[in-house]
Image (spheres, coloured by chain):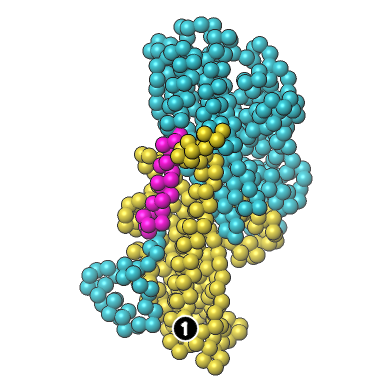
Amino acid sequence: MAGEEDELPEETELSYDQKKEIAKWFLLNAPAGEINYVAKDLKAVLSDEEVYNEAAMEAFPVYNKSHMICLEMPSRDGDVIVSSYSEIAENEYIDPRTAQVAIVDHVKQICTKVRPANDEELPSLYIEEYRNALDAEIQRYVSESYPKGISAVNCVKGKDTEGPGSDFEFVVIITAMRLSPQNFCSGSWRSVWNIDFQDESQVLDIKGKLQVGAHYFEEGNVELDAKKDFQDSTIFQSADDCAIAIANIIRHHETEYLAALEVAYSKLPDNTFKDLRRKLPVTRTLFPWQNTLQFSLTREVEKELGLGK
Amino acid sequence: MEAALGLLRRMPPKQSETALSALLSLIPQHSSDLLSQVDLPLQVLRDIESGKDFILCEYNRDADSYRSPWSNKYLPPLEDALYPSSELRKLEVEANDIFAIYRDQYYEGGISSVYMWEDDNEGFVACFLIKKDGSKSGHGRRGCLEEGAWDAIHVIQVGPEEEGMAHYCLTSTIMLSLATDDESSGKFGLSGSIRRQMKMDLAVAEGHLCNMGRMIEELEGKLRNSLDQVYFGKTREMVCTLRPPAEIVQMRLPDT
């Protein structure tokens, strides 16, 4: 990007590739749920359909996966989450719950059709027992705590394990998004929990990553960007017991995190913000602009106290 | 052009510089419009002669040099440069001194600069700037912030004096970003910018500086409150909409 800054404003045309990279940058940096608004404005600024289309083909899949967008499956049995954990091929994403593979159009952000997943794509019965139990517990948690949350559990390692004796790994995804253009507001919550089932130590190593974003842009532009990593563990038990233990751990950490966010927000007006600008001077009165004598005095005092800058 | 501004409004506020230079290279024919409508975080230069920092902006720039409000000299030195009249310069000097104290009272640190120049309507324009680094390593008194930046740009047009009154038009822009990093809430960052205008007709009896100062103080206060309550408040509301706090969830269960 740095090269472009020097190329103003004479007739130096940007190359096709340079324009494409810029277009991709704008698309990739769109806030959650706003990529289509960005796309519309970008097309107008670019006025070059070819560049836009190529940039979109490259940027949309990356954006969709990183934001873990949810697409409705035409078979009407729910949404499939587009993520790197559920990716089978560039436009194919597996929904483990319904054992289907969704074929998606990244740029249009829709699921065009589904097909049943074949045996190589699905986990073994042993793994599926654990996955299914966990999936059900997580769904229960999500429907209780998130008004519009969607979850999935994907096996990312060891899915062909036939029985005890090997390690395997699941990824739990919880995502919720809200888009309110008439209120100039949007937001997204993304949780990714890695559950590592370790056979030898009979321990489940749990690592979580939460990311929350919000954007408010009525006559202004303000963005929240918050994230946190978590670490926890529990013992390797039966499928049902593991599911309950894991869901409890996730519920506990996420609830605590939300409370911590609330605390951070409540400290803003009187503490955090004060480090930037106070609401009023220490004198608790407005600044005495008309009193120039006071200024000379203040300046003298400040000099004496070594406070002047 | 509208599309360009739309894009800027959606890009992360911390990336506004990158976004602006990308747009400038895509639509160079609109560069003067873009540069005048978009504000970027302020930059600072040291005036070695007076030992103080001053803020750079379009209003103290001539070619590639910038005029220091302390020494009234351009850095790097420039021949045939633009200067305010000696009368206006006197007002400018006073404004810088007083504004520095105002800045200290509200910001407990930071850097400020004031620039003035005559405009075509027999009035003048003044630009009051503040830059504050509120992070732990900067001037943050309470050590709350990992990162904290506040940039304020106040441009005020003063009309000619008529029957003891003058018309003032103030446009204020605040850009800020803050980030905390602690055990319980992890990395928490808020950033953004807003711009508002305020127009008033005031008696010149107490002097222009007094009038301008009061308007700036009032608008700055309003913007600070707006950012805090409305803007940040809306993002907080959004988080609670995505995932309501536990107490509310528990209360809902009996109904479902």
Q: In which quarter of the image is the N terminus of chain B?
A: bottom right
- Look at label 1 and name its amino acid: His
- B196 versus A80 height, above or below: below
Residue A196 lies left or right of residue B100; in this view the side is right
Residue at the spot x=43%, y=27% of the render?
A249
Q: Which residue lies furthest to the right in this view?
A: A49
- The residue wearing badge 1 is B208
x%, y% of residue A144?
Answer: 53, 32
Q: What's the magenta region?
A: A254-275
Question: The chain drawn cyan is chain what?
Answer: A
Q: Where is residue B190 in the image (x, y as percent from the top left)?
A: 48, 50
Would you identify the image quadrant in which residue A117 lies?
top right
Give x and y (percent) for residue A200: 40, 10
> Is residue A277 at least partly visible in the picture?
yes
Please indicate whether residue B97 sits to the left or right of residue A220 in the image. left
Q: The yellow chain is which one?
A: B
